[in-house]
Amino acid sequence: MTHRTTSHLVGLIGTGVGPSLTPAMHMAEGRAQGLDYVYRPIDLAALDIAPDRIGEVLGWARALGFDAVNVTHPCKQIVLRHLDRVDPVAQQLGAVNTVLFTDDGTVGHNTDTTGFAHGFTEGLPDADLDTVVLIGAGGAGTAVADALLRLGCRHLTVVDLDVDRASSLARELAQRHPAAQVDASSFDKLSVLLPDSDGVVHATPTGMAEHPGVAFDPALLHTDLWVADIVYRPLDTELLQAARAAGCRTLDGGHMAVHQAVDAFALITGITPDADRMSRHFRQLVENRAH
Ligand code: NAD
């Protein structure tokens, strides 16, 4: 059940959430929609609260009048056992990033995975999804993988520096999506995989301002490959620059970042926000913070 009132109090719970752009994105859209919409970061590290106390923190937030919270690193998995209900997509993924406090209890959703799917459909609408390589098997990579498979990807290969992590994610994905072929591979196989792939999604921290570079050899990019990066600080990563130079269609990480907020805003308010307006605002915020 969503809250169809004009006043909303929302939080973002996690460690190191202070610099997040999500609060500003939600609040600007709330104002534009004529709502009293307040969204505050709740930094567990600054408050010296261990992440495994997320259940208590949810109880406090509810008691203090919050309508909903976004939950981020490192609480997205552990929060599940503290919820009354979990939406099937989030349950399948085993991770929640949005919790609604409803009259019927706490309800969890995952708008990282729906946000990637919506951003992908928006930015690369007719991209072929037969054979896709995912680089990065962490939390964000897992949400992306589920989204790709829900969108109809038929053969997904997961690659990570941590080979065990790639293999275990591939095994879990294969169980969750039995119609698809999902496997893990190592970096040295990219030279064989990428020439025959339709697209590649990059989901490691490489390319962020504090981790510059490209996670794999850009010489492997070719004109028939689409390239999606989920890094969004900066938006125009070295990978995307190399991909454009190679003639690839590209999707930047802003699409996922905006659409996770779009989907959360809709769940929290019951109002479909203006995704283009949120995207323009987000891109301004990234640009301003880069200087
Ligand atoms: P994580 O730490 O959970 O996982 C990162 C994974 O990448 C790990 O499995 C690690 O082994 C692997 N890795 C690291 N360097 C690598 C390399 N050079 N080559 C191959 N694998 C490598 O992190 P996460 O939460 O999954 O986030 C990853 C990145 O995704 C973040 O740094 C952030 O830039 C981005 N992100 C974007 C959005 C968005 O909305 N666009 C959302 C979440 C995260």
Image (tube, rainbow, N blue to C red):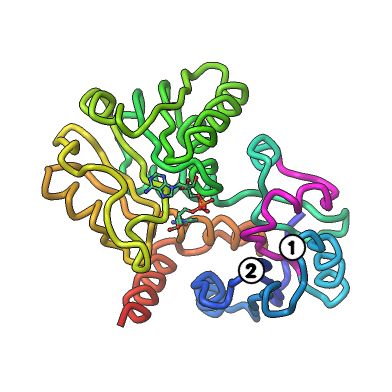
The amino acid on which the numbered mark 2 sits, given as a three-letter code, is: Thr
Question: Residue drawn 54% across and 36% down?
Answer: 165
Question: Residue drawn 47% across and 33% down?
Answer: 163
Question: Residue drawn 33% across and 77% down?
Answer: 290
- The residue that label 1 is drawn on is 51
Which residue is at the front of the view, 16 or 262? Answer: 16
Q: Please give left or right for residue 217 compared with residue 37 in the image.
A: left
The amino acid on which the numbered mark 1 sits, given as a three-letter code, is: Pro
Q: Quadrant of the N terminus?
A: bottom right
Q: Secondary structure at mark 2?
A: loop
Identify whether 108 is placed above or below 41. above
The image quadrant of residue 255 is bottom left
Which residue is at the front of the view, 190 or 61? Answer: 190
Identify whether 139 is placed above or below 286. above
| Disc 2/disc 1 C-alpha distance (Å) | 8 Å
For the record, the magenta segment spans 67-87
Q: Please give left or right for residue 279 compared with residue 35 in the image.
A: left
- The residue that label 2 is drawn on is 15
User: Where is residue 41 shown, x and y percent of the image?
Assistant: 64, 76
User: Is-magenta flag for residue 219?
Assistant: no
The image quadrant of residue 128 is top left
Number of other residues with Cα within 10 Å of mark 1, as a class: few under 14, some 14 to 19, many 20 or more: some
Question: Residue drawn 55% across and 32% down?
Answer: 169
Ranked by sequence position, the earlier of labels 2 and 1 is: 2
Q: Please give left or right for residue 221 compared with residue 62 in the image.
A: left
User: Where is residue 108 shown, x and y percent of the image?
Assistant: 73, 51
